[in-house]
Image (cartoon, coloured by chain):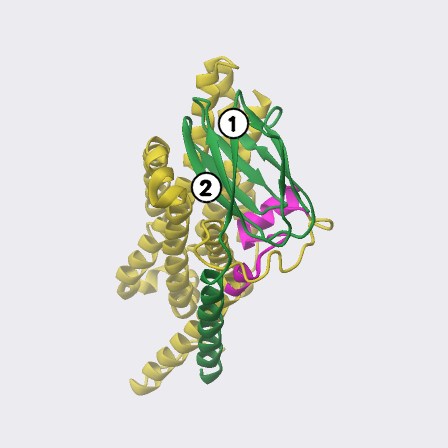
Chain colours: A yellow, B green
């Protein structure tokens, strides 16, 4: 039972950290609960579907279909996060400061949330599909009773969810002044980490070169499988021994988002000056 | 902005050069291993160092397994009764342990690069 709980916990943990972070980052946007819940629901349905068709997926593209699939859905999540971060850089502060003054932004807010629904759904789908496959294997091998297995799975899910909730509550304690800087930075690193993971899958499938494998190896200091390593992996894409191309993807996403944010801020400032509106903040 | 453009063009050039050299490379080495009764066979896999290797893993069990190795930086689900491909390396000489995550007590193995 405990080995079941442990494996399910590890799978749930990553998705849970992402949901915790996304929930914190969308603080103040009306209706976000429904969107995030929708993401979890779609993710769960999707993971059952993916688990069922894993054999077909694995057989695609000369046995590397799984890598292609993972890289694609990670790529979609990265695009959503990039867009979200750029959008939040001009709207976020306003949203959290005064939820009532944003009537005109609600449609925009909904668009931002639909992007994050996709991110949450993708996170749940990836980790959920692996949990379903694992539990299916346990059930099939008959090594433990169904009741024991269900208990283990529930314990694992509860444990994983607890970590995500802890992250969420911890983030909410950050003073509002710093809140958007911190959550935006975390979302940026989450996106970069996902891009690096996509790169790893493409290397594993031999579709892109590793450039250097590994570029460095600090698994003696902070191994991937340690508790801190696992949390950092889920949150900011920590990898003790990344290949060169993973680092290239990581940096490319950071550069893309930073450039996008700068551009968005400049153009929103230009609009304000042009229409001669008073600016509430100058930062 | 100019700096970013320069960075990306550098990136693209670097990528295209390396993809080019990749395809000009020597024929790849394929090694087969089998999962049966939640065990890898063989459990020790000797491979040449500094060369890319294609692992073909056949899962003869009815249950799915997940090939996972932190030192190889690889992770992949192998559905029951099917075969998948995983590329590893080029590796520096050394030992690279791996496990079947879904059956960690029995499914263990090591890639030894020489």
Depth check, front residue: A103 or A248: A248
**Which class describes the residues within 10 Å of circle 1: few (<14), some (14-19), or many (20+)?**
many
The quadrant of the rendering that contains the N terminus of chain A is top right
On the image, numbered disc 2 is attached to which residue?
Answer: B85
Residue B105 falls inside the magenta stretch = no
- Whether residue B86 is visible to the viewer of this picture, yes or no, is yes
- Circle count: 2
Q: Is residue A98 visible?
A: no
Query: What label sits on residue A272 in the rendered view?
Result: none
Is A50 located above or below residue A87 in the figure?
above
Q: Chain of mark 2?
A: B
Q: Quadrant of residue A216?
A: bottom right
Identified at 43% across, 29% down, the residue is A133
Other residues around mark 2 within 10 Å, as few (<14) / some (14–19) / many (≥20): many
- Look at the numbered disc 2 and give the secondary structure of its residue: strand
Q: Chain of mark 1?
A: B
Whole-percent x, y for residue B15 in the image = 47, 68
Calculate the distance from the C-alpha at mark 2 to the C-alpha at mark 1. Answer: 13 Å
Q: Are marks 2 and 1 in contact (CB under 8 Å)?
A: no
Task: Return the residue nearer the eye: B18 or A109.
Answer: B18
- Tell me if residue A239 is in the magenta stretch: yes
Q: Residue at x 53, y 33 (%)?
A: B33
From this viewpoint, which residue is outermost toward the right? Answer: A220
Q: Nearer the viewer, residue A120 or B60?
A: B60
List x then y, in percent, for residue B19.
Answer: 45, 64
Instruction: Give how far across and how far down residue B83 sits, in percent.
Output: 43, 34
Discs 2, 1: same chain = yes
Query: Which residue does the image show at 69% across and 54% down from the upper left?
Result: A218
Boundaries of the magenta span: A223-248
Picture coordinates of residue A213, whole percent (x, y): 60, 56
Q: Which residue is mark 1?
A: B35
Instruction: Identify the secondary structure beneath mark 1.
Output: strand
């Amino acid at each position: 039972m405990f080995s079941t709980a442990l494996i399910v916990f590890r799978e749930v943990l990553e998705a849970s950290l992402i949901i915790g972070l996304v929930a914190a980052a969308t603080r103040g946007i009306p209706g976000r609960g429904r969107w995030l819940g929708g993401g979890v629901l779609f993710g769960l349905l999707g993971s059952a579907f993916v688990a069922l068709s894993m054999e077909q997926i694995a057989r695609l593209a000369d046995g590397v279909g799984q890598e292609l699939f993972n890289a694609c859905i990670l790529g979609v999540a990265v695009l959503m996060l990039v867009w979200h971060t750029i959008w939040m850089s001009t709207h976020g502060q306003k949203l959290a400061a005064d939820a009532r003054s944003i009537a005109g932004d609600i449609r925009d807010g909904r668009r931002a949330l639909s992007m994050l629904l996709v991110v949450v759904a993708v996170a749940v789908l990836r980790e959920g599909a692996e949990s379903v496959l694992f539990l299916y294997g346990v059930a099939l091998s008959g090594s433990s009773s169904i009741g024991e297995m269900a208990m283990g799975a529930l314990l694992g899910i509860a444990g994983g969810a607890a970590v995500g909730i802890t992250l969420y509550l911890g983030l909410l304690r950050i003073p509002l002044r710093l809140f958007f800087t911190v959550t935006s930075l975390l979302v940026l690193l989450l996106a970069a980490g996902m891009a690096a993971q996509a790169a790893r899958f493409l290397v594993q499938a031999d579709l892109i070169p590793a450039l250097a494998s590994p570029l460095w190896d600090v698994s003696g200091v902070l191994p991937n499988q340690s508790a801190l390593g696992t949390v950092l992996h889920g949150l900011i894409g920590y990898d003790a021994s990344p290949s060169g191309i993973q680092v290239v993807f990581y940096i490319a996403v950071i550069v893309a988002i930073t450039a996008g944010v700068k551009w968005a801020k400049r153009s929103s400032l230009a609009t304000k000056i042009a229409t001669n509106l008073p600016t509430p903040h100058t930062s | 902005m100019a700096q970013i453009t320069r960075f990306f063009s550098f990136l693209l050039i670097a990528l295209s050069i390396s993809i080019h050299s990749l395809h000009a490379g020597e024929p790849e080495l394929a090694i087969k291993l089998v999962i049966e009764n939640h065990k890898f066979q063989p459990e020790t896999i000797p491979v040449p160092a500094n060369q890319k290797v294609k692992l073909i893993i056949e899962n003869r069990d009815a249950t799915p397994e997940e090939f996972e190795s932190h030192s190889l930086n690889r992770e992949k689900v192998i559905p029951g009764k099917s075969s998948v491909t995983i590329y590893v390396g080029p590796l520096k000489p050394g030992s690279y342990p791996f496990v079947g995550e879904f059956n960690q007590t029995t499914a263990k193995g090591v890639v030894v690069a020489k």
